[in-house]
Amino acid sequence: MSGIPGLIVAAPSSGSGKTTALCLLAAGLVRRGVAVRPFKAGPDYLDPTHHRAVTGRESRNLDGWMMGRDGVAMALARGSAGGALALIEGMMGLFDGRSPDSLDGSAAQLAQWLSARVILVIDASAMARSAAAVAEGFANHASGVVVAGVIFNRVGSAGHARLLRAALSHTRGPDGAPLRYLGAVPQDAALALPERHLGLVAARQATLSVDVLAEHAARHLDLDAVLALAQQTALPLPAVPGPLPPRVRIGVARDDAFHFYYADNLDLLREAGAQLVPFSPLADARLPEGLDGLIIGGGYPEAHAETLSANATMRADIAAFAASGRLVYAECGGLMYLGASLTVGAREHPMCGVLDHRTAMADRLVVLGYREVETTADSILGPAGTTFRGHEFHHSVLSSPPTAPTIYTWSGYGGSGREGYARGRVLASYIHAHWGGSPDIPRRLVAACGES
């Protein structure tokens, strides 16, 4: 088992500037010729698009609760190939995860499992010495979570930065050593990431300049100290199996309407013998030829409902594909697209009609949470009793639920229910699955495609 130097970029809370800080570090280090490999803690599809825009490399999710320790290690290994430094962006606050009484799913859990040092990003816009107290509290909160340095964000002036640095010099971690000052990033509109109704926009909609990021990093961050901290540990990298020779062709919807996919799920399909064929429900008139299965992931079908609906030939192709008995697997946005219609505002847009449900956009977040799933019937994912973990996060509702049977029973923090609508070889759900902790599922799905 080999290793790679690495760091976790975390914060006391969401909105502190973790994504900006990681992009600054990555841009500055890439300019120096360092082969940075980016990662994102937790169930997030959007921050990784910013990582990729800066590094040119696919950013992988690492989630201890969804993937398990072995799944995290394999994802880290897949994403670190050819790299010299792994940068892992945390989720929410450093210690936030699945529940308030455990570190499951948190960036802190990753720090413990990987023995990775943590850089804490603190929004210091309304603090001076108090920011040092926050840093010291986080550094001493949990054993095995080593906060090695601090980046102060949204700093008002050079004088403000001097106050913060002086205050931090009086802090101590559990080993008695002071926390390392790694820089102060000024309040700057050029570094702001715009917001949208589900959080950050995808990178292709943002305007951050990689050159501007690299210049800010060189000016405001101690990149030499960051590299020195990273070299203190080597994150473990197990061997990764190569892909099998392709034996089935699976179409994967990839465009502005459907782009929420975990890179490791797609790699697990390739490793099981799938050739993944991208297609666009927005722009392509027909499905690619010779497909054995379809995967339609999440995204923003509501933002493109009119165009999706107007592409009648694609909708008809997908309906005919499902009717032919070939495999169709859909998550969240894909569930919405497979239904009879999608209502946005006052307008109802016809969709594929593979299943008979109707969805409608709400004016608020409807569901957010982790899900542990067990199937109650044989399906394209495997026999009854198949289990996996994932998450649910959407602003739409089933205004008219499918008449198809539900084959998922799920439980989450504080709740449970039934989901997963199956009819023939079609399976659609609001739940985004991560197969890193259930690698048999992609193998079974590929095998099921071969039975078409």
Image: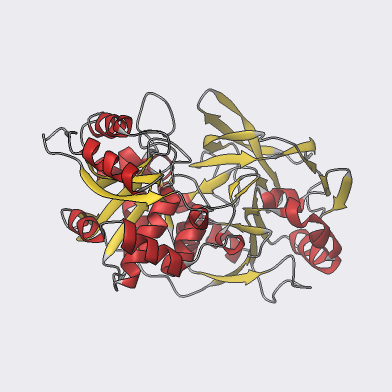
Q: Is residue 78 visible?
A: no
Q: Nearer the viewer, residue 254 or 421?
A: 254
Closest to the observer: 105 or 245? Answer: 105
Instruction: Let me know if residue 451 appears in the view.
Output: yes
Q: Residue furthest right?
A: 347
Which residue lies at the image location 17% right of the left edge and 57% below the top edge? 228
Q: Quadrant location of the N terminus? A: bottom left
> Residue 156, located in which quarter of the rendered image?
top left
**Is residue 263 left or right of 344 when viewed as pictured?**
left
Residue 14 on image: x %, y %: 46, 39
Question: At x 15% / y 39%, what residue is drawn?
Answer: 178
Specify the quadrant that holds the C terminus.
bottom right
> Residue, x 64% and y 32% (percent of image)?
418
Instruction: Give the total of numbered labels.
Output: 0
Residue 17 image point, x, y percent: 44, 46
Residue situated in front as seen by the camera: 37 or 160: 160
* Left or right position of 433 against 324: left
Residue 356, percent from left and from top: 82, 45
Residue located 62% across and 70% down the image: 278
Q: Is residue 247 above or below residue 45?
A: below
